[in-house]
Amino acid sequence: QVQLIESGGGLVQPGGSLRLSCAASGSTFGINRMGWYRRAPGKQRELVAAITSGGFTDYRDSVKGRFTVSRDTAKNTVHLQMNSLKPEDTAVYYCNAVTGWADYWGQGTQVTVSS
């Protein structure tokens, strides 16, 4: 089992920045990839960014150049630095960890971009 605890969401004005963090505990030795998904009201959950244990990253097109995903393997944490935020980034953001036996999810943290 892997437990994921997210932090760092909140309300920010357009153009502002937020940093999300996710701390993993439990059977973290089995984590191959960690990342962030989001679900906006009325929409399906979508991948935002992910990073493998080898450091390879993947971003959805709409956040490239604005968001940066990073991972501290020693501390079993993953971060999402979000800059130049737009109203369309408003969503609940979920941390995800992929192991060889299951996917795990955090409880979600709300990000609201509004003036």
Image (tube, rainbow, N blue to C red):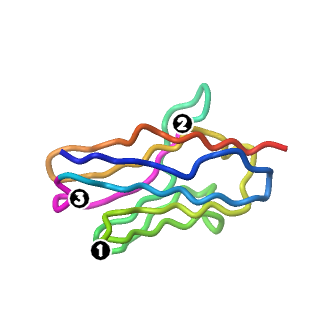
Horizontal relation, residue 78 to residue 97: left or right:
right
Q: Looking at the image, which residue is at 59% across and 47% down?
A: 9
Q: Are marks 1 and 3 in contact (CB under 8 Å)?
A: no
The answer to if 38 sits in the magenta stretch is yes
Pointer 1 local density, CA inside 10 Å: few below 14, some 14–19, many at least 20? few
Circle 2 SS class: strand
Magenta extent: 27-39
Measure the C-alpha gap from mark 2 to mark 1: 27 Å
Q: Which residue is mark 1?
A: 54
Looking at marks 2 and 3 on the same chain, the residue that comes earlier in the sequence is marked by 3
The relative height of residue 88 versus residue 35 in the rendered view (above or below) is: above
The relative height of residue 47 versus residue 84 in the rendered view (above or below) is: above
Q: Which residue is mark 2?
A: 39
Q: Which residue is mark 3?
A: 31
Circle 1 SS class: loop
1 vs 3, front mark: 3
